[in-house]
Image (cartoon, rainbow, N blue to C red):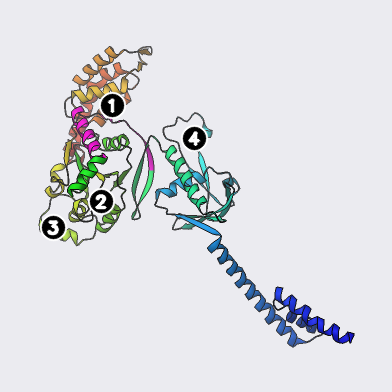
Amino acid sequence: MSGISGGSSSPLQMSLLDIFFPGFSMASASARQLLAGNLDSYTRLLCTLGMFVLFTRYAVRYVGELVRSYFTSTIHVSYYDEAYDMLVDWIAHQPFVRNAHSIIARVRSPQRTIIQNQAKKKPLTFSPWDGSFPFWYKGHLLILHCAVKDHREDIHITSIGLYPNILKELVEECRGNYLNNISKKITVFEHREGDWKKTRLRPIRPVSTVIMDKQVQDDLLGDVKDFLDEDTQKWYADRGIPYQRGYLLYGPPGTGKSSFSLSLAGEFELDIYTLQLSSISDSKLMKLFAELPPHCIVLLEDVDAAGMGRRDDAAADQESNSGSGVTLSGLLNVLDGVSSQEGRVLIMTTNHIEHLDEALIRPGRTDKKVHFNLADRKISAQLFHTVFKQAPDHNQSKKRLGDGTIERLAKDFASKVPDEVFSPAEVLSFLLEQKTSPFGAVAGVETWVAKANEAASQLKRDGSWVQEGR
């Protein structure tokens, strides 16, 4: 009887083991027979082990999917979205980066910083690269995933736990730090592979430092300020008028058209989106304009050089079928067609307004045309003031000059510069060469004018295109 009862307990014990370890009884029996030399049992053991491995892999995958579905949250950021820059800047300053097994080094030179020693020149920042990196944030375990695709990063962050809002809190913190870092700077976006991408930050330049006609400057500032007002937006909407504004800045090279555009962006704290029309097609232009934010400045520089010149109907049809660069009809469509974006301030610049098609610069597409002149006496004097105000003369025992002296020297300097011959950029370039000596600038300006005129005459005789702007 005891033998019978002992034999009946063994199957019960084995069945309990099979519940927790499936296939254990079969594997155990096969192992005993294998030790006894039974080759058939050896084959059964291999099959059992194979099934056990497959089952384990399936179980691990199933549990992993279960955890990812119900116990994790993930946030993704696009490489071309500004949220990517916010996140990357935040990550670069986190302690876990120092222990990352795969990192990328980048040079991050500060804006307008005087480098006093070699150690601070071209500082490096380090970021995780191509891998998964766990870290803790406010008591929550997060995992940063970085994958390299086409020489750029695809980034997403996963949180482990039942609190998905932690990821939103992280991105909001990144946003706050990013806005503090870019304060008093202009964010410049450019076209990259069919999308807008932030390329650099520019320090805000006060509009007052742009040397141009004061009345024209005030008129432009007032017009843009009125357009950006919330009441103006409602006024446009109530009357069904497209809410957009366009400006054409024209004049010779070096007269301050681009500088004024950047200063305008800083004055109203707007991002600026720059675009070269010769490098994209009509379809890409339409896509880029559709992705513009509600309030921004779009800068199209040198539109006359991008095939936007005058043409007849046959030439326009031929260009439309060429597929290279932006066509006139494609540009007009994004400016005021059904696909035009509202809320943006459009600025176009050109050195030759006479080369532009009338359809492009008619009222409604170009609301204001502003001529940027070559330097006259007033502009030359303003430039002199800008360079030498409250500056000592190093050739006069570093004696600080009073406002009256600077005023007198400025008038003397401006009287020796011929009107509307040189651009403000050319005059400023000469003044910067003499930036330590206002007396030296006045004494040497006549020699500089003579040499510049002689060089210009030589270039003109040689057929150089440099003189076309004058």
Q: In the image, what residue type sits under mark 4?
A: Lys
Q: Secondary structure at mark 2?
A: loop
Magenta: main secondary structure: helix
Q: In the image, what residue type sits under mark 2?
A: Gln
| Tags 4 and 3 touching, CB below 8 Å | no
Question: For mark 1, what is the residue?
Answer: 430
Say which of 91 and 428 sits in front: 91
First-in-chain label (4 vs 2): 4
Question: For mark 2, what is the residue?
Answer: 341
Q: Which residues are magenta?
A: 200-229
Say which of 391 and 334 sits in front: 334
User: Residue at image x 17%, y 39%?
Assistant: 368
First-in-chain label (2 vs 1): 2
Question: For mark 3, what is the residue?
Answer: 315
Q: Position of residue 393 (x, y in %)?
A: 35, 15
Q: Residues within 10 Å of mark 2 (few under 14, many from 20)?
A: many
First-in-chain label (3 vs 1): 3
Query: Rounded to the nearest whole Å, what is the CA distance between mark 4 and mark 3?
Result: 53 Å
Q: Is residue 110 visible?
A: yes
Numbered tag placed on residue 121 in the rendering: 4
Left or right relative to 30: residue 133: left
Q: Position of residue 247 (x, y in %)?
A: 20, 41
User: Residue at image x 44%, y 49%?
Assistant: 84
Q: Quadrant of the C terminus?
A: top left
Q: Residues within 10 Å of mark 4 (few under 14, many from 20)?
A: some
Q: Nearer the viewer, mark 3 or mark 2?
A: 2
Q: Quadrant of the N terminus?
A: bottom right
Q: In the image, what residue type sits under mark 1?
A: Phe
Q: In the image, what residue type sits under mark 3?
A: Ala
Q: Nearer the viewer, mark 4 or mark 2?
A: 2
